[in-house]
Image (spheres, coloured by chain):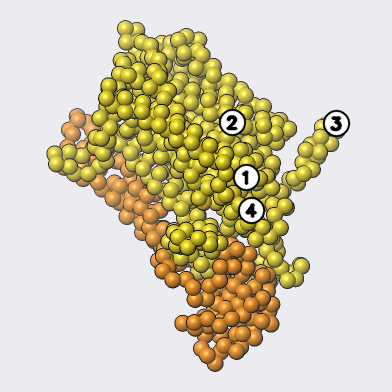
Chain colours: A orange, B yellow
Amino acid sequence: MRGIVGVFPELDATVEAVAELKKLRVGDVTVYSPTPRHELDDVLKQGPSVVRVYTLIGALAGVTFGYWIPIWVSDYWPLVVGGKPIASWVPYTIIGFELMVLIGSLATVLGLFVNARIPRITQTVGYDPRFSDGSFGIWVECRPDEQETVRRVLAANGAAEVRDER
Amino acid sequence: MSTMAPDRIELRRDNTATADVQLPAVKSYTQATDEILDTLRVTKAWFAGLGVAVLCLLIGGTAWAYQIYMGLGVAGYRPPVMWGVYIITFVFWIGIGHAGTLISAILYLFRAGFRTTIYRCAEAMTVFAVMTAGLFPILHLGRPWKFFWLIPYPHWRLIWPQFKSPLVWDVFAVLTYLTVSATFLFIGLIPDIAVLRDRETNPVRKQIFGVLSFGWRNSDREWRHFARAYLFLAAFSTPLVLSVHSVVSFDFAMANLPGWHTTIFPPYFVAGAIFSGMGMVFTIIIPVRRWFKLKHYVTINVLDAGAKLCLFTSLVVGCAYLTEFFIAWYSGSEVEQSYFWNRVFGQWWWAAWIMLTCNAILPLLLFSQRLRRNTTFLFTLSIFINLGMWYERFVIIVPSMSHEFEPWKWGPYAPTYIDWAILLGSFGWFSMWFLLFIKQLPVLAIAEVKEIVPPRMRHAHAEPDPEGHSIAPGLIGSYEVR
């Protein structure tokens, strides 16, 4: 993995640099920001997050298990009361709901971890501690013949620092 | 009106009406990082506070050990009142935990910007309050080491818990709430722990923060999925917070006792829980903003908005109190009417009037904008609210058990010094965790605060792009998820 990293103090300069890199179709661009910003979303034009799929699957699994376990237990150990169903779904809705929330939430966290690719063991290449403080950053993973173009674009758009990383 | 208007303008001069979603005194991302991380410096006052908390915890622990040795009788439990201070305090702490989720999740979904600077504190309060509440069902057991019998698993006798029992619902609801609120808190902390990691100079602490931040790098990919996951966790937490106190209210409403067996309990409990939680938020956040010099983050407008929420929930709770009396009168049930008369004018009049005064009468003062923006008043009122909400649970639990259907069953109840010691211990336990939290992790959400701080711009006024998204500072209140 080799590429160029640019450190930007300003948001609009970062946006303009990303837009130009996208236009030139050079390398694989990753943008760092201390906080999420729509301006960066807009210029990167990424699709919706797929975490929602994990959430849906987790919630469905949770509610199914939450109904199934008390129904199965009622059937396994029936308490026969005249005129009353062995498995009464109304109180079991509480178990179903709570497990839907529990498993759905944990599945959401799993979806976040899988898609955001965390936990990450190493985080040094292409990263600068200033990106969690007050600066924005662009990391472009690119071929050697593209590096000069990337370096020029980053510098021309107001990068405070441009450096090679590998 | 003409004489009132200038006063109102005067009151609002320091913070404009829209400033509750903006922080005019915070000029840059770096300033926000520096000032929030500055709260982590350990002081002598903090050590003193931690010492007091641990002392209270030790007093409670000693009382519990004595109770285990002697039996539950030392806690004043004798027929007919078999639920007392422990269940009162259990419901009290569960209620405290509700405002945290309200502020962090429900207000997030409603895009209420004023939550940004107080939600971390409230979320931590939620987790520690639920941890405290979870102790009380165990404290209430004669053989606490058997508590795991409530957890549904096929043990050696192949007997399962009764899934139609409200106590089993409690286990599911409270454990789910604890897990989800702790997850919500921790997920929100990840970007801030990354800030700590990047600023840390001690290699051991840097390593620990590195592990806890999961190698978070603030990349566009991470933020995109983070925002979506955070939204879904908020969406799950919102009905969860309503369900948990509803389930706790079922502990009472499913029993056939006068004063308990009523359908008003779930909404009544939920409103009471949010009200009591807001009271505790004020008790915590007002000293925190003063001691940590965070007045330009937790602004008067933020407190004003919180006070309005507190007033609203107080009105709901007051309405529920009146509705209870109406239901008793309208039911025509002599037992129900006798019970409510006894509650307010009989054996327990003093507890009922503490409840009514603190929860329904004193909060009406919040109609005054001048008082809503007075931190000394808000802090004092919050203490009364905490007291009143503890007594609300006392009034719900004890009078019903001591004054049920047949007069020969009626009896007295008085908490013993063991009860009071364990109640004190619970405050020590809660305070200890909270004090440890605020010196290890940021008490304000750094990444979210930066959302409402204008970023540095090369061009002062950028034009909107063709899709209408302007590159403009400080307009986002909370990040809109796509």
Q: Earlier in the sequence, mark 2 or mark 1?
A: 1
- Contact (Cβ within 8 Å) of mark 2 with mark 1: no
| Residue receiving disc 4 | B35
| Residue receiving disc 3 | B3
| Residue receiving disc 2 | B382
Question: Which chain is home to disc 3?
Answer: B
Q: Are the residues under marks 1 and 4 on the same chain?
A: yes
Give left or right: position of A121 versus B43.
left
| Amino acid bearing label 4 | Glu
Q: Is residue B468 among the parts visible in the rendering? A: no
- Contact (Cβ within 8 Å) of mark 3 with mark 2: no
Real-space Cα separation, disc 3 to disc 2, in angstroms: 31 Å
Real-space Cα separation, disc 3 to disc 4, in angstroms: 41 Å
Q: Disc 1 on helix, strand or loop?
A: loop
Real-space Cα separation, disc 4 to disc 2, in angstroms: 27 Å
Q: Quadrant of the N terminus of chain B?
A: top right
Q: Position of residue B214 (x, y in %)?
A: 44, 63
Q: Earlier in the sequence, mark 4 or mark 2?
A: 4
| Residue receiving disc 1 | B292
| Amino acid bearing label 2 | Ser
Between B111 and B142, the residue placed more toward the observer is B142
Q: Earlier in the sequence, mark 3 or mark 4?
A: 3
Identified at 45% across, 32% down, the residue is B55
Q: Disc 2 on helix, strand or loop?
A: helix
Foreground mark, 3 or 4, reads 4
Q: Earlier in the sequence, mark 1 or mark 4?
A: 4
Between A129 and A92, the residue placed more toward the observer is A129
Real-space Cα separation, disc 2 to disc 1, in angstroms: 20 Å
Task: Sort mark 1 into few (<14), some (14-19) or many (20+) by Cα contacts within 10 Å.
Answer: some
Identified at 53% across, 72% down, the residue is A127
